[in-house]
Image (cartoon, grey):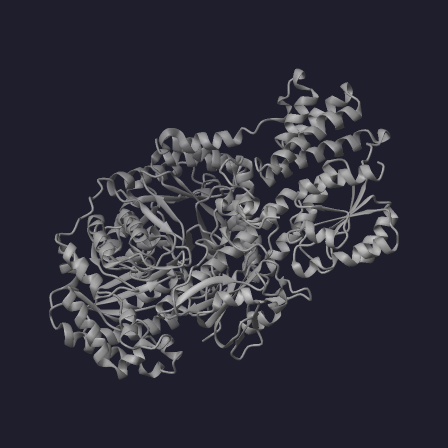
Amino acid sequence: MTDFIHTLNNNVLLGDGAMGTMLLKLGLPPGENPELWMMTHPDKIQTVHRAYLEAGSQIIETNTFGANRFKLLDYQAASRVREINRTAVKLAREIVGKKAFVAGIIGPTGRFPIPIGDCSWSQLEEVFGEQAQILEESGVDFIFLETFSDLGEIRAALYAAKKYTQLPVACSLTYSKGHTLTGTSPEVASIVLEAMGADVLGANCSTGCRELLDIMKAYRRSTRLPLLVEPNAGIPELVDGKTVYRETPEVLAAYVEAFRQTGVNLIGACCGSTPEHIRAMSATLVNREPVIPPGSSLAAPTKLTSRSKIVRLGAHEYPVLIGERINPTARKTIAQALREQNWSFIVGEGSAQLEAGAELLDFNTGLPGADESHLLAEGVHKLQMALDAPLVLDCTKPSALEKGLQEYHGKALINSVNGEDQSLRSILPLAKEYGAAVLGLTLNENGIPETAEGRFAIAEKIMTQALSYGLAKEDILIDCLVLTAATSPSMAMETLKTISLIKQRLGLTTILGLSNVSHGLPQRSWLNSAFLALAIAAGLDAAIANPTDKRIQETLLAAALLSGRDPGARCYVGAAANAAAPPPTLINAEEISLSALQNQIFQGRTEAIVPLVSQLVAKHDLLSIVNQGIIPPLEKIGELFAQGKVFLPQLMLAGDAAKCAFTFLKEALPENDVQQKGTVVIGTVKGDIHDIGKNIVAALLENHGYRVIDLGKSVSAKEFFNAAQQENAQVVCLSALMTTTMVEMKPVIDLFKKENSLAKVLVGGAVVTADYALEIGADGYGKDAVEAVKCIQTLTKESGL
Amino acid sequence: MNPQALHLPLSLTVEEIYPYLGITDDTITPSLHKLIGHYIRLIIQSAQPAGVWKNIEISELRRDRIILENSELVIEGSNTVSHFQTCSSVTLLAATLGLQTDDLLLKTKNSQLEILVCDSAASAAAENITEQLDIMISREILRQGLYPTSRFSPGYGDWPLSWQKEFIQSVDAGQIGLTVSPHFLLQPIKSVTAVIGLSRIPVTRNYTTPQRQKPCKGSFSCSACPLGAHCPDKY
């Protein structure tokens, strides 16, 4: 058999179609395990293989999708893994001989890796390794990992297939709306899996051709590896009462050329497809010449990813901030949090750095006496679940790093390796096996060389060694190291020279642990930011720094623009616009008018209200401010809301602004005592704990000048009544969100009636209708907050206020 | 292996929250956009999203009720039963954001707007997790040569919410921390239960994106309902 990858690189090959669909047609009962059924119906499996081969398939897939230990365990057949896989390969090979390639199919286990599910890396490695090894022994031409929906699981499968076999490995994920179940895009998948040594990448199952064509284009933008696609086809849908087959053989065939043009070299079909589909595709696939993607003249950037996000670093990219603050050596609070395993604190620290502008997070577990393997693995679990930034694993212990890399569902940066042979030998293989990039420090057993040339020599050694281990050049990064200016002020310039040398002669991505430069000196931010600017000018691509330092943020923006790395000044201008918040004092003397107040309230600009109202009280009496300044914009926005022309948040912002004005008037002029329009008691009825709607109505009422007694959630009839009596309320508002709690409204109304209370009862809430309000004897009903307020205005007028 | 629990990662865009805030176009101010983004981050940080599902055979399909095998749960209501006429089994699913999100919702007190934004982001997150589970379960159903029905929950149509307790027991939702209040509300608050039928013939999934078209008898107020003005049953 000729080499599969060689053939695939030079030809577009046709895969086969669905196995399950065909077996169902041949008598497999729905819900039964196709692999176990194969053991009693081997002829049926061969019938399917033969049909696809005759239809033109050049790759025949073994019936082993669920033949892993975990899946078979569901059928009490875990002990039959070897027997089933061997049989499946034998059945396929007997039919195809040397006329086609045999793909050893491995599907997902149905279990998910920690922290998504409960499966450990070693369990997954064992299960996938076992199946891959048996498939290789039985004579498949390559391993085909298909229909995976989680990047973490397929990473483990790929790792195991590479470790336990010599075969090429194809990796295929399944997508919905552009990403996998756990949030991975094709771009992220290709970066992560290519770095781990995948030979072919692609997508199967998912949906039909149209969506998968977009997925394949996304893959093509981000990798030069051969691609594969196997769309679903022939699954009937019911549309307007009619059964519709959207993906007929003709439709599928029509997409074949589009896939080829996109650079897909293996085209097959998945669920629902039949030999008819393959035959139609084969007929259309006249030109079998692969379309090779054009190469780029620019050096490839370093790409790091989390499960869902990509960050690029390099000479043609915007310089990146790496958050340095999760570091127990530098910060006692972090040390304590790590010691107590207070992960929500650590996650909060990460989140704050991302919000401040960091794009990568350095995670350092160097806590004296701690089990770093455990901390790194556990921290990786927590951080990758809550935050989407790629991680920099800051640890030099190979055993701990390995654990962290196993658990990381993305492409991490290892921080760090150095020029010592021992360090290179232990760290570089990990980077290769687990598909990570590596940061090399320009030091060795003799320390940090004083000269730029000396450091450059170490960087060159690290690069040569890393390349020999098979790392891509863009995955080798260098930290040129800076010493504190307190003891060696002249050394800072050597660091800058080293950066320039490495950029010019090696073209590697450079990173700097920035804050060291100011160690032991006052006003560290001055030095850090100045050095950041100098280093970016010298060609620095990323700084490990404190992103919450405003000066660092501003310096990065300015230096990126000045060094030509912010095309069109987009980042700079965007940030500058945000920084220039309108000062509240911008109101001119002539703008101090009631109509200006109306405007500010309408636009919900709470910050402008107090300065404006504080000047208005000198010119206008209280009643005019309220009736001509505050109420009209509230009514206007209420009307627009009712017409669907403004949205709830805008209504509420205006409400907040009005409240701001009322509060100021009350506090500034207590002797005048802002006249209350009336008193309203409000609450959700017994058993109902959903209070958002009730709160909005309460806030809106306050904004309109009502005195509101909010009784909160799950209020009993008696509590409503007592409060109404005590506060002398004109209106009582009852809110309920669910049909099961809505029934609690009637007892409240009944109690008020029984006691002959003068207070009016208004009801509202998601499930409450006008009819229901009438039925239970309520005095009013509000379908939304604005209508509730209107209704209360009417009711309070009726009560003579 | 059935039932199994999954802790799915959350990923939400600002635009996904719009329907819950009643926003129907893209004209919101940068400050509101930023506020929504802020609460999305808080929700993702606080949430411990978990889902669980279980396949159960139908033992008896009557005109007005479906009896399940080895389960106290009854799918009740003649309108509800019509959704599952062609099914011989169903998958029950339950999902929750966990108690920490409830805490966050309780602690958010800055302004009514922020409370609403926080709550909306949490609702969208719960829907997002449910949708992820739905996609996975549906894929499994299709691979078996069967067809998934729409999701349907206690409290929709004529299926009384009072079955919620039996529902969470049947799917063993206790393992993801789900309980039911005496008024049949789920706790933690941001939780979802739903059933998907395994149909022998293709059926209409009457929504493409469930969050945009779902019956409103559930937990939405009309103003927060994704359907907004387009709802045929708007009161």
Q: Quadrant of the N terminus of chain B?
A: bottom left
Q: Quadrant of residue B77?
A: bottom right
Q: Residue at x 77, y 38 (%)?
A: A794
Is residue A687 rendered to the left or right of residue A471? right
Nearer-the-camera pick, A782 or A595: A782
Where residue A113 sits in the image (x, y, percent)? 42, 66
Q: Nearer the viewer, residue A534 or B144?
A: B144
- Percent from the top left, x then y, of residue B45? 54, 53
Whether residue A450 is situated above or below residue A78 in the rendered picture: above
Q: Is residue B104 above or below residue B229?
A: below
Look at 12% across and 52% down and name the residue there.
A287
Q: To which quarter of the image does residue A100 belong? A: bottom left
Q: In the picture provided, is A338 more to the left or to the right than A471?
A: right
Q: Position of residue A378 (x, y in %)?
A: 48, 63
Could you tell me which residue is drawn at 31 percent across and 68 percent down?
A: A160
Is residue A500 in view?
yes
Q: Is residue A201 above or below residue A106?
A: above
Q: Is residue A418 visible?
A: no
A764, A186: nearer the viewer: A764
Total marks in image: 0
